[in-house]
Amino acid sequence: MKKFSENQYKIEILTIDEFSNLIQDKFREYNIKDKIKYFDYNDDLSKVFMSDDFVKYCKFFVAYNNKDIIGILKFGKFYKDYSISYLSVNSDYQNKGIVKDLLKKFLKYFKDNYNNEILNLSGYTVSGWKYLRPEILQLSKKYHIKLKEGYIEYDINWKTDKEIYDKAEEEIEKLYGKKYAY
């Protein structure tokens, strides 16, 4: 893996409006949805169906350079739980250490602002379970953050992924005392 140097991009913590303005100012012609899995212009930026509480707590940790949005971590308060909604890296920048940089920035923010809260994680993809989860576990220990995880919910190929899905489900049940963390 060739590390993509942090000085080649910046990570900012943005509200919904600030993220929308960044897109309008710098990435108007750029189709984020084609590069960032799970990003959705309506779900992420339109406040029409969002509660005031959700809008208040929602933050986007956005990695970008002059050319591209490189990665996005969406955080918010969903009902009573503080949660990462998704973490996704631009398909042109994967395997360059960006996930770890986004997680470090986010977990430090979470520690500084929500010190006694539990961080809830939405379900993983199979690759998220394999590669993202170890980083989350390591960094959450470093920052002393309590987690409540979901199991593998997305991008499952039942012909090839059933064994890892079963092991993940077993581990989540062992850690949290029930089949599903939520």
Image: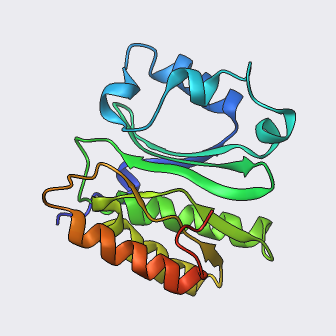
From the viewer's side, name the closer residue of 56 and 156. Answer: 156
Residue 158, relative to residue 91: is it above or below?
A: below
The quarter of the rendered structure image containing the N terminus is: bottom left
In the rendering, at what x and y percent does residue 127 appear? 27, 60
In the rendering, at what x and y percent does residue 101 appear? 44, 63
The residue located at (75%, 29%) in the rendering is 50
From the viewer's side, name the closer residue of 163 and 135. Answer: 163
The residue located at (35%, 50%) in the rendering is 8
Query: In the picture provided, is 44 more to the left or to the right than 58?
Result: left
Residue 55, relative to residue 95: is it above or below?
A: above
In the rendering, at what x and y percent does residue 139 appear? 51, 78
Query: In the picture provided, is 83 more to the left or to the right than 157?
Result: right
Residue 157, relative to residue 36: is it above or below?
A: below
The quarter of the rendered structure image containing the C terminus is: bottom right
The residue located at (46%, 15%) in the rendering is 28
Residue 137, relative to residue 31: is it above or below?
A: below
- Using the rendered view, name the quadrant where residue 24 is placed: top right
Residue extending farthest right? 52
Query: In the picture provided, is 82 more to the left or to the right than 80?
Result: left
Q: How many numbered marks are there?
A: 0
Tell me how the rendering is colored: rainbow
In the rendering, at what x and y percent does residue 179 appear? 52, 72
Residue extending farthest left? 159
Query: In the picture provided, is 56 more to the left or to the right than 1?
Result: right
The residue located at (41%, 72%) in the rendering is 169
- Using the rendered view, name the quadrant where residue 49 is placed: top right
